Image (tube, grey):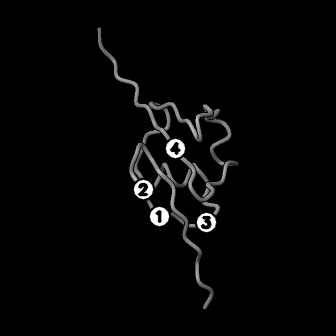
Amino acid sequence: MKKIKKIKIKVNGKKILIKDKEKLSKILQDLKIPIKKVAIEINREIINKNKLNLIKAKENDVVEIVHFIGGG
């Protein structure tokens, strides 16, 4: 049986373990984060949401997710 390599990344200041080269869209799905209502930054670079299926996480990536909140 092939062992799946895990890596550590930081999401909004919290360290989590994920599969190596996991796509960002899968990570957000697993965290139950609604993609339409957030802005995403990886290693201080804002990510185009159309590229979430193309971007793979790497060891020690720092992901910041900002939720939009309506109001006046």
Q: Which amino acid does label 1 sit on?
A: Leu
Q: Nearer the viewer, residue 38 or 6?
A: 6
* Quadrant, the C terminus: top left
Q: Marks 1 and 3: CB-CB under 8 Å?
A: no
**Gap between marks 1 and 2 measured at Cα:** 7 Å
Which circle's residue, 3 or 2, is located before the other in the chain? 2
* Residue named by callout 4: 63
**Gap between marks 1 and 3 measured at Cα:** 9 Å
Frontmost of labels 3 and 2 is: 2
Q: What residue type is labelled 4?
A: Val
Q: Marks 1 and 2: CB-CB under 8 Å?
A: yes
Q: How many residues crowd mark 3 within 10 Å: few (<14), some (14–19), many (20+)?
A: some
Q: Residue 17: percent from the left, percent from the top?
A: 47, 64
Residue 41 in which image quadrant: top right
Q: Is residue 64 above or below residue 60?
A: above
Q: Which of 1 and 13 is in front in this view?
A: 13
**Gap between marks 3 and 2 measured at Cα:** 14 Å
Which circle's residue, 4 or 3, is located before the other in the chain? 3
* Residue named by callout 1: 17
* Residue named by callout 2: 15
Which circle's residue, 2 or 4, is located before the other in the chain? 2
Left or right of 33 on screen, residue 55: right
**Gap between marks 2 and 4 measured at Cα:** 10 Å
- Element type at mark 4: strand
Left or right of 1 on screen, residue 15: left
Q: How many residues crowd mark 4 within 10 Å: few (<14), some (14–19), many (20+)?
A: many
Q: Is residue 65 above or below residue 68?
A: below
**Gap between marks 4 and 3 measured at Cα:** 15 Å
Q: In this view, does 9 lie above or below 65?
A: below
Which circle's residue, 4 or 1, is located before the other in the chain? 1
